[in-house]
Image (cartoon, rainbow, N blue to C red):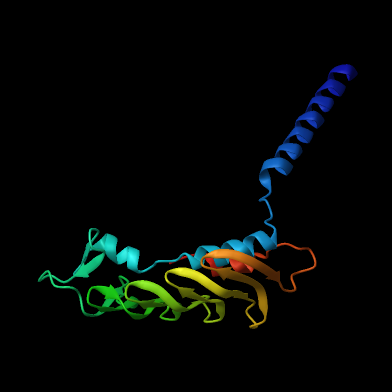
């Protein structure tokens, strides 16, 4: 009888240890290295073509021609003026100035709360000039520049207090140099940044 109870106890302990091992292996979320995440955030946002790509897909009140890469109005003339997208709540989602069927000037994207989320400068339909990305609270998150549709010069990722977290230097769209600012002692990316990197 004692041997039977002992064998049940040993089996229960074995099952419990297997459950703990499985949880330890699968239950924890992997923690990302802050350097990799910082570089990926800058790279991903640097390749942003929103809202232009979204407008081209929707074709609501404006028509995109893949053959000549121009936007046209309902009269089949190159679109001229400011095209505005709205959320279902009627808040502005984006505003895109067009000249001769191409984006021209500051293309602005807004969060649902009405705060500016992203600003991309276009010249003759190409990203060329300043780029700024803000978090949901209005803090500057990323700044950089484009030249001929490619990332150019210094691209910076910021902490909410405005201090620089990461700098990537690009030349003709290719990463040439990186610099990392002060990060937490544990070297891990904190959960508070998840909201910063999500797109609307």
- Give the image location of residue 60, x and y in percent: 21, 66
Answer yes or no: is residue 112 visible: no
Answer yes or no: is residue 21 visible: yes
**Image position of 200 with respect to 145: above or below:** above
Task: State the count of labels.
Answer: 0
The quarter of the rendered structure image containing the N terminus is top right
- Give the image location of residue 22, x and y in percent: 71, 37
Residue at screen point 50% across, 67% down: 45
- Give the image location of residue 27, x and y in percent: 67, 45
Side of 184 where 129 appears, left or right:
left
The residue lying furthest to the right in this view is: 2
Residue at screen point 62% across, 66% down: 176
Q: Nearer the viewer, residue 152 or 52?
A: 152
**Image position of 76 with respect to 121: above or below:** above
Side of 79 where 126 appears, left or right:
right
Residue at screen point 71% across, 70% down: 180
Residue 24, quarter of the rendered image: top right
**Image position of 21 with respect to 191: above or below:** above
Side of 122 where 152 appears, left or right:
right
Residue 115, quarter of the rendered image: bottom left
The quarter of the rendered structure image containing the C terminus is bottom left
Residue at screen point 72% across, 62% down: 188
Q: Nearer the viewer, residue 123 or 163?
A: 123
Q: Nearer the viewer, residue 196 or 95?
A: 95
Residue 158, quarter of the rendered image: bottom right
């Amino acid at each position: 009888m004692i041997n039977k109870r002992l064998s049940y106890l040993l089996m229960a302990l074995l099952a419990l240890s297997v459950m703990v091992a499985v949880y330890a292996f699968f239950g924890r979320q992997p923690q990302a290295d802050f350097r990799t995440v910082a570089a990926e955030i800058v790279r991903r946002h640097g390749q942003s073509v929103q809202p232009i790509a979204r407008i081209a897909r929707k074709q609501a009140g404006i028509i995109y021609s893949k053959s000549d890469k121009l936007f046209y109005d309902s009269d089949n003339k190159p679109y001229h003026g400011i095209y505005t997208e709205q959320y279902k709540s009627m808040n502005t989602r984006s505003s895109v100035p067009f000249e001769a069927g191409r984006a021209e000037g500051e293309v602005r994207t807004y969060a649902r709360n009405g705060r500016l989320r992203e600003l991309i400068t276009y010249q003759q339909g190409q990203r060329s000039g300043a780029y700024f990305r803000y978090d949901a609270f209005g803090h500057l998150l990323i700044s950089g520049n484009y030249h001929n549709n490619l990332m150019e010069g210094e691209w910076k990722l910021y902490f909410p207090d405005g201090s620089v977290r990461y700098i990537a230097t690009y030349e003709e769209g290719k990463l040439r140099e990186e610099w990392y600012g002060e990060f937490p002692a544990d070297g891990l990316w904190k959960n508070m940044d998840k909201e910063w990197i999500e797109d609307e």
